Amino acid sequence: MAASRSPVPDVPADLLAPNVRLLEPGTLFDRIYDPAYLANSFNPGRGEPTRFAPIFETDGSTPVSTLYVGATRECAFHERIFHDLPISGPGRFVRFARIRHLHYCELRTTTPLTIVQLFAPDLARWGLTRANLIDTRPRSYPRTARWAEEIYRRFSSVQGLMWSSRLCEPDASLVLFGPRILDGSLVVNSPSRAITQDLELVENMESYALRAGVETEGSIPKA
């Protein structure tokens, strides 16, 4: 039997310049993260592969630090806590014990950011659809990350990517490129809170889970 062909094409040598959006100072992002790191710190290339990371500088060995955020709180929950759940079946649930270490915070930009758009019309400019970059499964992450890497290397003014979340459309997910973000350009806008210890956040999560048919298991904190 022939091997299945990846839905992610190679990046063409003559890739057209991307469509970009300028995010104004004061833009808010939502982030769920491990408090072993600062709320606005960038991942230096560690951990499991993701859709658009790890990526490397042109020398092929220096990692480009990245940071994922959501444009809404619901998007951030879907992209971090619900991201790897099966679409159906008994495994579609979240145990509070497994996310006890995660915190939530809101981040704010203080300078303009130039972000590449990866929405359907922008992908069509490159002859792509969401199925090629956004709706792929984890086995395709090395190839989707190559697109992020080539965009980063070829277009020196871009500071990140944004796309309609696979799990929470039409809300946007973003990945920011650490070397292109000036110190002080991304600040913490609200205190960090442990998700499973905060009544408001647990109620948010329960609401998002109910909407998506996800079950939760754990004790709700007292008001």
Image (tube, helix red, strand yellow):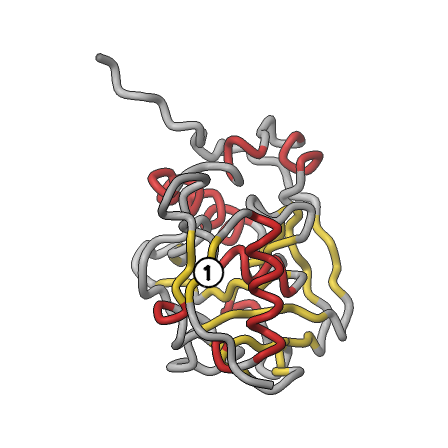
The spot of residue 184 in percent (x, y) is 61, 83
Q: Which of 204 and 42 is in front in this view?
A: 204
Q: Quadrant of residue 173?
A: bottom right
Q: Within 10 Å of the Cα at label 1, are there few (<14), some (14-19), or many (20+) other Cα atoms?
A: some
| Secondary structure category for the residue under label 1 | strand
Q: Nearer the viewer, residue 72 or 95?
A: 95
Q: Which of 54 and 69 is in front in this view?
A: 69
Question: How many numbered badges does the structure rendering display?
Answer: 1
Residue farthest along the top direction in this orientation = 1
Q: In this view, does 141 lie to the left or right of 188?
A: left
Quadrant including the N terminus: top left
Residue shown at 47%/55% (left/top)?
215
Q: Say which residue label 1 marks.
A: 216
Residue shown at 47%/43% (left/top)?
147
Q: Which residue type carries mark 1?
A: Thr
The spot of residue 214 in percent (x, y) is 50, 51
The spot of residue 95 in percent (x, y) is 39, 64
Residue shown at 66%/41% (left/top)?
119
The spot of residue 159 in percent (x, y) is 60, 61
Q: In which quarter of the image is residue 48?
A: bottom left
Residue shown at 55%/81% (left/top)?
198
Residue 137: in sight, yes or no?
yes
Quadrant including the C terminus: bottom right
Q: In this view, does 18 lie above or below 23?
A: above
Residue farthest along the left direction in this orientation = 1
Q: Is residue 213 above or below residue 193?
A: above
Residue 41: in sight, yes or no?
no
